[in-house]
Image (cartoon, helix red, strand yellow):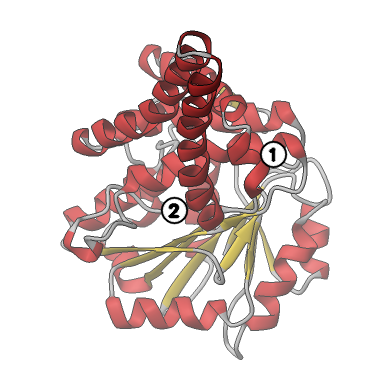
Amino acid sequence: MVPARDEGAVLAERLAAAVAQAAPGDEVVVVDDHSTDDTAAVAAAAGATVVLAPPLPPGWTGKAWACATGAATTTGAVLCFLDADTTLAPGALDRLVGAQADAGGLVSAQPYHRVPRPYERLSAFFNVVALMGTEGCTPLGDRRRPGGAFGPVLVVSRRDYDDLGGHASVAGAVLDDVELARVWHAGGRRVHLYGGAGVATFRMYPGGLGHLLEGWTKNFGAGARAVRPVAAVLVALWLSLPLEALWWALRLATHGGRAGGVAAAAGLYGVVVVQLWWMLRRVGSFGFVTALAFPVPLVVFGATFLVSLALSVTRRPVRWKGRRVPSGPRSAQSRPGP
């Protein structure tokens, strides 16, 4: 099931992968969330069943309403929610459904981020921090309860979805994936997170730098408020490393003597570059150059995060795809489902 708003330009390619993997009896549903382009026509031409979302009720976000609307039209025993910018790898649908059948609960995967244009590489720190904040992909594995899920790929059983209230239980949440994980935990179900390399890819913000900044501003302040304290401290410590390396590199280069200072500065800088490159290789196609130029995406991350956090604290709305979206992590009370 794919909630889609103004995705006509890219939807055909993404849907083709899902339709190709659908078994007889599977339902591939696209919920057109009041698009102003040809999203519905593109989805129908790709072989999906198109459902038009009813008018958005008060207290709901568009995505939660579209997902709830789509779920109500289907009959399958397993529900797989995919963002419109997500492309499944060959065989991924069977693997995801099999993982849910084996593990139970909520199964979620963070897609591998494709960043073909230079400005898209500014997402580097956002991607790594988002993964770290969930606490789901650590050496502790399932021994550490994840603090969230990954919205682009969510797989649940119909029984759990209905019993726990589905998207109606997170109707007003900007970060519906974080809140769904909480609902599943509260209901005694497990949440299982996986890296998406070899499972799914996405391209988050192809619409330009403004699109990228708007999207991360919408998500990150609320995301920081939702991260558990221990994880927040560890993420903050990790982010302090490149800042400290930059400070010491500049200090050593300017005060440590011409040869020794420059060598020490280069060594400190190189340690951060190698460590960041090792992490970025696992989350997207950022490349070594992004790690080498890490001060640039780090500054963009810091500035965007502060703006997003300020909006979240003051509860001021942000704009996303033509709508004013509340910026708090839990923006409204749950509403009845469709």
Image coordinates for residue 283, horizontal then vertical, percent: 53, 53
Q: Residue at x 75, y 58 (%)?
A: 11
The answer to whether residue 33 is seen in the rendering is: no
The residue wearing badge 1 is 120
Left or right: residue 90 compared with residue 140: right
The crowd level at tag 1 (other Cα within 10 Å; few <14, some 14-19, many 20+) is many
Left or right: residue 27 compared with residue 167: right
Q: Nearer the viewer, mark 1 or mark 2?
A: 1
Image coordinates for residue 284, horizontal then vertical, percent: 59, 53
**Kind of residue at badge 1:** Glu
- Snapshot quadrant of residue 112: bottom right
| Front residue of this view, candidates 203 and 325 | 203
| Front residue of this view, candidates 24 and 99 | 99
Image coordinates for residue 232, horizontal then vertical, percent: 27, 33
N-terminal of the pair, mark 1 or mark 2, is 1
The answer to whether residue 40 is seen in the rendering is: yes
* Distance (Cα) linking label 1 and label 2: 20 Å
Q: Residue at x 61, y 50 (%)?
A: 53
The residue wearing badge 2 is 150
